[in-house]
Structures are given as structure tokens and as C-alpha cells.
Amino acid sequence: MKRTPLESWIAAKIGAPGRPEPELLRAYQLEKLRETVAYVKSRSRFYKQRLADVSADDIKSLADIARLPFTYPQDIAGSPNDFICVSPREIERIVTLSTSGTTGNPKRVFFTPDDQELTTDFFHHGMTTLTDETDRVMIFMPGTTPGSVGDLLTKGLARYGCTGIVYGPVRDYNHALQALIDEKITALVGIPSQILALARTELPGGGKLSVKNVLLSADYVPKAAVRAIERAWGAAVYGHYGMTETGLGGGVECQARDGYHLREADLYVEIVDPVTGIPVPDGDEGEVVFTTLTRRGMPLVRYRTGDRARFMTEPCPCGTVLRRLGRVMGRLGEVIRLPDGRTLSITELDEIILADDGVIAYDASLETRDGEVTLAVVLRSEGRTDTARLAQRLQSQFGHLFASGVLKLDVREGDPAFFTTGTLKRKITDRRGY
Ligand SMILES: [Zn+2]
């Protein structure tokens, strides 16, 4: 098994001879953290206030990061411009993100050309995990705008002679499959729901796919989707973890395909208790929080991602000295509270519902019907789903939820127009009292 290429990349970035031994990496991160705190305090209106009571000198060890206040997505939505640390003409790319909050203010994230170079460089080295110069990679993500994920990824691939072809988000699955065949694609990058749908679309007659490696990029990758894609195509499926705020890239799985190695020279990642905010011991699950160590346009200090994960304590089979972030277990917000106080998350439902051959996406909601609390699941499927059987599997898997007798289960096929085909988002909503 090949060791993650991020190891030698990070060693070179931090100036470590050979391997980025943990004590060298931590010393580098501490120095960069102190630099970042001093930098944002002197340049960003937001951090001038938020960090008014702390100085870089207060941070004597990485554990002292716990003395710094958090940055929340709402902070960015509230006043994105207050985060900017450079003059407006140094900003090359602005990404606008919608927020689910009640304010409805979009978040804006700003990047300088140097910030974008950091991402391209990560894409270059990260992608050598699963591709080399002989590969042809199709990118099912936006890529027409300079600085978009597809654009930077194509540039990163080109640096080692690998061909990247931006297809963009899938709207027509037959068309996308045909493109994979026509372009003799050997590897692809996309979001889990779209690639799952693609793997579940029948190949055009006489067509043959040569896809060997797949990279799924998202905050959360359902295991059921990975298994289904691997079965359909006989391809190896890797996960990437990242978001616009981390600089698009964040971490990528090695050939062990069991947890993400992170861009540790660019990001300092912590796991904290989502309620108390106190960092949890390695191995315990909590909320992913990161601090950017090398960004210039809009650095972020202790940014709360809302993603649930843990640091894995076992050494990685690939033999690296780098840490491993375990699979993201979903988002803190994507949970509904059941009548008996227990919770149900979209990730729990995913593993049962997406394991069904025909299902591509679904909408789950908790509703009150005739005074009884009902879990209603509307499927987007290819019409091949045995809804009664799926209901039975949910019933047996989540027996504890129904034990009290207050819950009913209703599984049905949705009108094909029920979901917009572009995004295929899975949703879980609490509609009680609406
Ligand atoms: Zn590894």
C-alpha cells in the first residue's frame, strides 16, 4: 500500500527532513497559529474585536488554542467584509454560500491568488493518491469560473501531466455516462448523491466504462453509497473532506480508504464538545473545528463546521505519521428529536435507505398524522423499489424508535418531479406542529 502523498508534501512545506514527525509538525503549527492570531488582530475588523482580550503571546502551546473564542458561520454571514485582511484589489475570488439560518444572509469567503495556489497545490498532491499521468479524470463539479473547484482541480492535475475534464454537475445521467465512455475516463470526482445516481443508471447498449478510481467530495459520504458505487463499477472509492471555508480542499483518504489525512501544514483541526466547546480527547466524537494557518485574504480562527467526526487513534495502515480524521458522521443540524428524547439523524437513515438498489435520494420528515407521530419517507427512485420491504428493514433496524407505539412509518415513492434532479439532496425535517 502506498503511503499518503500528503506526508512528503507536508514535510517539504514545513521544512522537515524526510518525514513530518509529529513534534516538528506541532512546532510548525504553533508558530503559524501565533502568526495567524497576530495577523488577523492587526488586519481584520472582526478579529480586532473578537480577539481583543488575547494576544499571540498568550499562546505558548497548541493546547492554548482553547483560550481563543470560536468563529461561527453566522459571524461570516453577518459581516463577511469585516473578515478581509488585505486590500480589495488583492482579492481574486469571492465565493457566496447560502446559509440555512433564519437570517438568510449569505456567507462570503474571499481568496487571494496565493490562497488559491495553496488549494491547487493540495489538489495536485492529494490526487496523486489515486491517479497518475496516464489517467483521464472527469470532474462532475462546477469548473467554468476561474478559481472554481473544477478549475483549480484541473490545474492541480495538469501539474503532473494528468488530464482533467470538467463536466460540471450532472443534469442528465445518460448523457454523463456516455461522456465517461466517449472520453475514455479512468477516474472521476463528484458528490456522493450524483455519483451514486450515475452508478445506478443503466449503461447505454454496448458501452463499456473504464473508471477505476472515484473520489467523492462532500462533508459526509454515506458508506452505503461507497459500497454501491464499488459494486456497480468495480472501482475504488476514496473520500475527500473539505468545504469552501477550508479553502475547498481539506483532507483526503489514502489507499487504506479509512479516514482522511489532512492538510496539516495549512489547517489546524480540533474536535470539540459541541455543547461545552471544550476540546475532546483523541478518539472521542465531537464537532470539527479548524483554524487556517497559511491563508492571507480571509483567515479563520477556530471555525465551527457543524460536522461530527473524531480523530482516529489507531495508526493508519499506510504507515504515515500524519493524523487521521475519521469518517464524518453527519452534520449537527441534520438531526431530529423523537418523542422519547432520542434523536434520529440523516446519516442513520442513509445507511438503510441508500443501501436499496433503486433509491437515489429521499426526503424524511417527522409529522403528526391523526394525533400520531409518523416518520414519513418519500423516495426518489428508479421505480424499482419495494417500499414495503424497505419499510420493514427500517422498522427492524430502528425498532427502538417505534417501540413506544407513538411512531408510525410511511414509505412511498415520490412523484419524479418531487425532487429537483440537479442536487438530489437528502433531507430530514421536523414538520410536527406545522
Ligand atoms: Zn493512510
Image (cartoon, grey):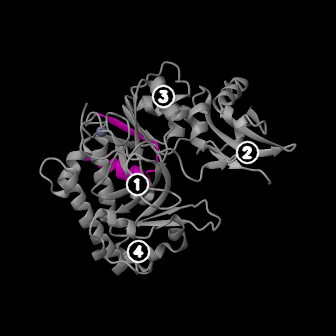
Q: Which residue type does callout 2 highlight?
A: Leu
Nearer-N-terminus badge (4/1): 4
Q: Position of residue 318 (x, y in %)?
A: 27, 35
Q: Looking at the figure, which quarter contains the C terminus? A: bottom right
Measure the alpha-carbon separation of dots 1 and 3.
Answer: 25 Å
Position of residue 393 relative to residue 424, above or below, is above
* Residue at (73% x, 34% y) in the render: 403
Q: Secondary structure at mark 4?
A: loop
The kind of residue tagged 3 is: Arg
Q: Taking 330 as reference, is 76 above or below it?
A: below
Magenta segment range? Answer: 135-160
Residue 371: % across, % down: 86, 44
At x 30%, y 67%, the residue is 33
Report which residue position mark 1 lands on: 248
**Label 2 sits on residue:** 366
Cβ–Cβ below 8 Å for labels 4 and 1? no
In magenta stretch: residue 137: yes
State the residue position of label 3.
227
Disc 1, SS: loop
The image's mark for residue 84 is: 4
- Image coordinates for residue 422, horizontal then vertical, percent: 59, 44
Circle nearer the viewer, 1 or 3: 3
Q: Is 304 or 406 nearer to us in this picture? A: 406
Q: Residue at x 24, y 37 (%)?
A: 319
**Crowding at label 1, few (<14), some or many (≥20) Cα neighbours within 10 Å?**
some
Q: Is mark 3 within 8 Å of ligand 1?
A: no
Pointer 2 or 4: first along the chain: 4
Q: Ligand 1 is in which quadrant of the figure?
A: top left
Label 4 amino acid?
Ile
Residue at the spot x=75%, y=34% of the render?
A: 409
Q: Nearer the viewer, mark 2 or mark 3?
A: 2
Badge 4: residue crowd in 10 Å (few <14, some 14–19, many ≥20): many
